[in-house]
Image: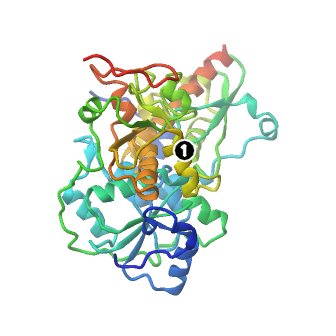
Amino acid sequence: MSSAPLPGAFAEIAEEFLALTGRDRLQLLLEFSHDLPELPERYIAHPELLEPVPECQSPIFLITEVEGTGREAIAHLFFSAPEEAPTTRGFASILAEALDGRTVGEVLDTPEEVINSLGLGEVVSPLRLNGMAGMLARIKRQLIEKAG
Amino acid sequence: MTIPADPTPALQEYAHPEKLVTTQWLADRLASGDTDGLVVVESDEDVLLYETGHIPGAVKVDWHLDLNDPVTRDYVDGEGFAKLMDASGITRDTTVVIYGDKSNWWAAYALWVFELFGHEDVRLLDGGRAAWQAEGREMTTSDEGRPAPTTGYPVVQREDAPQRAFREDVLDFLGGPLIDVRSPQEYSGERTHMPDYPQEGTVRGGHIPTARSVPWGRAAAEDGRFRPRAELEAIYREEIGLDPAEPTIVYCRIGERSAHTWFVLTYLLGFESVRNYDGSWTEWGNGVRLPITHGVEPGKVPAR
């Protein structure tokens, strides 16, 4: 079975991760976790607008916004996760870097395999990686609802 | 035992006070530089927490990645464990102090696995990572003070029987002292996983027939430390009616929260025989011909 090439941003992130091994790969995930953008003020004041992601081990909440309609609309992603959950923050940060500002069509076409292509299964365990799949699934569902 | 037990008076009321150390004891020991024969191990739910900062000199052991064999769906074998110990600078007579996040769930689980291999002296840091941090004690991201790898940890045959229960054991045990330590919602079958936790693919919700519900957290104080012995006795002996002389089995979802209760019953209350059913609800909830009970009552032993 041949797999399709990864969408651009994921290909770059995967290259970064796969160039490293073991502890260094984990360090890169930690750097991602530090780089997770802060939640904008309008959501800090209204945490109830965010959707929880129960597939993650630690509490994380996300919300999407779209500019325009249909597949050409631009998708924006926002996440909230506590400092003491660095793995979850790292996952969110990867998705933010790869997908924020892309078109809704591009996000919807992102295959779930991207999550297993980053070489993270062996450093964080496949079970923990389920959390990232849960986030991607929720992002897609929200975008379908919001982009019409 | 290589290193004398922590003499802190508050610990002495427990059945086996030598299985716990206080944050002050560990901090003093590290500050004195007298760490010969001692290795501190961090074991967390979040696999990156250690990298954000850990107790100086601590090594990381991850339950998922280091202690499990994904092919056999079992713990590592004697060779795998010896290799991990050598890499962690732990010899057979090293005193190991384990701490972690989430009130020491995973630390207790790691301790339980160390004991499957008969490692003599393994202790928990009371209160775990959260207590250490809350007291503003030193954390570092540096490898300095980390023990150098050692060689020659013996290849020990894992001995499961005394402290590990399998599904067949549990099936034969229905009606006996069986404790479900999950949340009340998981016990009743309203949900199959912890609130806000990953769905781990359990098909049925409910509990093992006749199991009593005692959520693990009842044994922990707000600061993550274990509750005083009298409070623990009031829960497990008076309220639930458990008898320390009677063999007891505990379970949860994948065995991590029940390792916490296993530690409480075995070492804090001195129960003679407690086994952790680590297959727990992820196995039982999906198992063919394994009966379950819905609702808040323990239920009856099903006819076989």
Image label count: 1
Q: Residue A42: name its quadrant.
A: top right
Q: Name the residue located 51 percent from the left edge and 24 percent from the top edge.
A: B188
Residue B155, image x and y in percent?
A: 17, 63
Q: Residue B118: name its quadrant.
A: bottom left
Q: Name the residue located 52 percent from the left edge and 43 percent from the top edge.
A: B238
Looking at the image, which is closer to me, B52 or B30?
Answer: B30
Residue A141, image x and y in percent?
A: 58, 21
Counting other residues with Cα less than 10 Å from the Cα at mark 1, is it few (<14), some (14-19), or many (20 or more)?
some
Q: Residue A43: name its quadrant.
A: top right
**The C terminus of chain B lies in quadrant:** top left
What type is the residue that disc 1 sits on? Ile
Looking at the image, which is closer to me, B35 or B228?
Answer: B228
Question: Do we see residue A76 in this rendering?
Answer: no
Secondary element type, mark 1: helix
Side of B8 where B97 appears, left or right: left
Which residue is tagged 1? B235
**The N terminus of chain B lies in quadrant:** bottom left
Residue B120, image x and y in percent?
A: 30, 67
Above or below — where is B77 with respect to B85?
Answer: above
Above or below — where is B14 with respect to A42?
Answer: below
Above or below — where is B259 with respect to B93?
Answer: above
Q: Name the residue located 62 percent from the left edge and 27 percent from the top edge.
A: A103
Above or below — where is B125 with respect to B258?
Answer: below
Instruction: Report the coloring of the rendering.
Output: rainbow
Which chain letter goes with mark 1?
Answer: B
Looking at the image, which is closer to me, A20 or B279?
Answer: B279
Question: Do we see residue B291 in this rendering?
Answer: yes
